[in-house]
Amino acid sequence: LAELIRLLEAFFFEGNGINITYLIPQSLLSFLPLHLPKGLPTTLVWQHFRALHLQGSPARKKISKTADEKKANKRQIKVKEWYSSRQKPLVGTYCLLALAYILILALFITVITRSTSGSSSADSNDLKNYVAQLASKVNAMEAKKEACDSAWIQFEDSCYYITTKKTNWQKARSFCVQEGGDLVVVNSEKEQKFLKEKSGVSNLKRFWIGLSDIEEEGTWTWVDGTDYSTSYQFWKKGEPNDHLTNEDCAHLWNPTGEWNDVHCTFQEPYAICEKKVKT
């Protein structure tokens, strides 16, 4: 009997290890514990049990083997159908749980993303603005650096070059023209202060500027054609006085930087050249 019960267990469940002793009549429980799926109908258990038991009788061996196999196959199909019907609800439950988990996770990610998107967007905009400001400053520095040639100093929209050799007015102008500019034309008090600071007139130096009355005595003209009568003027008190005649060229005079007229052949002054910034 015990052998038949073990065959029953192996035939139906192939060692699944599920306790089904509660389905077996009490008269059989004393033989050994059985392991069958929970809820298996008792009729199926006993039908198979009786079939196996009868197979051990010599009288039953005459029964057609084919008929026994068909019955066994039918019983096996019924058991499998029952087992499948029990498993489907569980599979559906697990699928629903998995779907719920995925939805909860997606909701969590969405909430976190939205809560941080505002601050991230603000930080991104701040960073972009900061980078743009840095780029603008760098571009301005590069433009300022490249606006004037080496050794030339930029002030507003002009570049200035202060010579290091003394010469007369005409030679000074020729040098400035050769460098792409001309002797400086002073247009404002602001420019005058800039020239005084950069030229070093306070160190008892003199510098030619682009102003003269060479063509007609008493009619002062700027080298670029600027109207003298309406232009800025910064003459030293009492100047221009054409002292001893033929003082026809102007220069910045030490130590204040005020203008003075002297002979154009005077060799002591340096010169200040001016040209427009590069565009």
Image: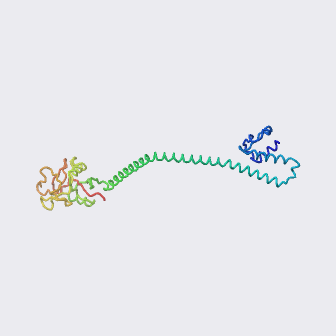
- Tell which of 117 and 65 is nearer to you: 65
| In this picture, residue 163 sits left or right of residue 25 | left
Most extreme residue toward the top is 30
Rendered position, 170 above or below 114: below
Residue at the spot 59% in from the left edge and 48% down from the top edge? 96
Most extreme residue toward the bottom is 215
Question: Where does residue 49 sit, x and y in percent of width and height?
Answer: 80, 45
Most extreme residue toward the front is 43
Question: Where does residue 249 sit, x and y in percent of width and height?
Answer: 17, 57
| In this picture, residue 84 sits left or right of residue 204 | right
* Image quarter (top left, top right, bottom left or bottom right) of the C terminus: bottom left
Residue at the spot 13% in from the left edge and 49% down from the top edge? 237
* Image quarter (top left, top right, bottom left or bottom right) of the N terminus: top right
Question: Where does residue 39 sit, x and y in percent of width and height?
Answer: 71, 44
Question: Where does residue 8 sit, x and y in percent of width and height?
Answer: 78, 46
Circle count = 0
In the rendered image, which quarter is residue 171 located in?
bottom left
Residue at the spot 27% in from the left edge and 58% down from the top edge? 276
Most extreme residue toward the right is 58
- Tell which of 164 and 254 is nearer to you: 254
What colour-coding does the image apply? rainbow
